[in-house]
């Protein structure tokens, strides 16, 4: 067992795929760990590693300074904490359960009413990466609690990053990354369907188009700056120039029997902006159209 001096006692409520990974690295990190799960069998490997089993969530909470919650959804997490009630007083709850920003805010209120500090964490990776130095977890809520337990939080993921005193912000950051991911993935898959229909290999395309594809993420800081300052004037690449390319993509897709919904959605945004007089603006202008729909 490796560890650090005075490693605080931790309770882990929820031993699914993620909760078991969290509890395991805490045991390995030298923390006294008490575990609880609705189905006891999932605790067996952790008890074999040195964790202690608690018969109820409240009993686990009562044995710990820091209470980690990782279950299926914000509503389940809130209910578990509610049933732990008075046992929460004086402890710090680190809720690593995914949910909406509203759920995180409501759970913070509940926990604080019971006299405990609250941090909401958004895990930005999958279970096998828990404990890795490059693993990113966004935290929001009580900054003093984050500072007090930063070493513990780094045991879970080396990049423990405090983002806001508002506990809803980590959930929003997590959703934003997913939002970007699905947009990029859908674009890639639509393109792959188009190329595949023409009998072209996707891996060969990917390799040859690398200079263009690898430039895409470098646009993010420019877009962010334009949106934050509402400055959409651009000397090149204005919305007017996007419309003919979108029409070509839609026509090519239609001719090949490939879905046209995705490019048509983009075309409609661009056309609306041009109609509203924004044809000479940068692509970032479209953020206003997402906000309105
Ligand atoms: N898995 C990942 O890689 C990953 C990555 C990022 C974030 N997350 C988030 O981590 C959280 C847990 O995910 P997971 O993948 O570990 O899920 P999972 O393997 O499906 O485990 C779900 C956990 O929630 C418990 N649970 C479900 N309903 C319950 C209820 N009504 N009362 C009490 N406990 C209940 C389950 O208990 P039983 O064992 O008794 O069913 C189990 O411990 C989710 O918010 C998920 O979005 C997971």
Image (tube, grey):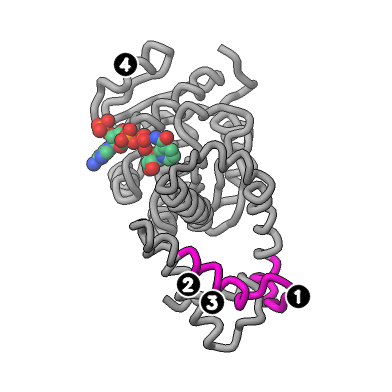
Screen quadrant of the C terminus = bottom left
**Residue receiving disc 3:** 288
Screen quadrant of the N terminus = top right
**Residue receiving disc 4:** 44
Report the predominant secondary structure element of the magenta stretch: helix
Segment colored magenta: 225-249
Which x, y percent locates residue 287?
A: 55, 72
Circles 2, 1 touching at the beta carbon (< 8 Å): no
Q: In this rendering, would 97 be left or right of 218?
A: left
* Few, some or many residues within 10 Å of mark 2 (<14, 14–19, 20+): many
Circles 1, 4 touching at the beta carbon (< 8 Å): no
Mark 4 or mark 2, which is nearer the start of the sequence? 4
Q: Nearer the viewer, residue 69 or 269?
A: 269
**Residue receiving disc 2:** 267
* Few, some or many residues within 10 Å of mark 4 (<14, 14–19, 20+): few
Circle 2 SS class: helix
**Residue receiving disc 1:** 235
Mark 3 or mark 2, which is nearer the start of the sequence? 2
Circle 3 SS class: helix
Q: Nearer the viewer, residue 271 or 146?
A: 271
Distance, label 2 to label 4, CA atoms, is: 55 Å
Mark 4 or mark 1, which is nearer the start of the sequence? 4
Mark 4 or mark 3, which is nearer the start of the sequence? 4
């Amino acid at each position: 067992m490796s560890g650090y001096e005075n490693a605080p006692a931790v309770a882990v409520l929820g031993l699914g795929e993620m909760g078991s990974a969290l509890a395991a690295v805490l045991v390995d990190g030298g923390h006294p760990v008490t575990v609880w799960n609705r189905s006891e069998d999932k605790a067996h490997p952790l008890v074999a590693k040195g964790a202690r089993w608690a018969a109820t969530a409240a009993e686990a909470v009562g044995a710990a300074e820091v209470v980690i919650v990782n279950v299926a959804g914000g509503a389940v997490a809130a209910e578990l904490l509610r049933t732990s009630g008075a046992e929460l007083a004086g402890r710090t709850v680190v809720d690593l359960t995914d949910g909406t920003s509203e759920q995180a805010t409501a759970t913070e209120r509940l926990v604080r009413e019971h006299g405990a500090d609250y941090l909401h964490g958004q895990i930005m990776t999958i279970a096998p990466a828990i404990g890795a130095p490059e693993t990113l977890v966004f935290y929001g809520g009580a900054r003093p609690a984050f500072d007090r337990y930063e070493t513990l939080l780094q045991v879970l993921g080396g990049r423990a990053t405090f983002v806001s005193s508002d506990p809803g912000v980590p959930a929003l950051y997590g959703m934003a990354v997913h939002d970007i991911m699905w947009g990029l993935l859908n674009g890639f898959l639509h393109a792959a369907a188009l190329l595949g229909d023409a009998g072209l290999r996707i891996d060969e395309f990917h390799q040859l188009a690398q200079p263009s594809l690898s430039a895409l993420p470098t646009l993010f800081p420019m877009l962010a700056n334009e949106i934050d300052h509402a400055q959409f004037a651009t000397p090149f690449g204005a919305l007017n120039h996007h419309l003919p390319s979108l029409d070509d993509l839609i026509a090519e897709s239609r001719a090949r029997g490939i879905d046209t919904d995705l490019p048509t959605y983009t075309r409609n945004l661009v056309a609306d902006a041009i109609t509203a007089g924004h044809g000479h603006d940068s692509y970032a202008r479209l953020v206003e159209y997402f906000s309105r729909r």
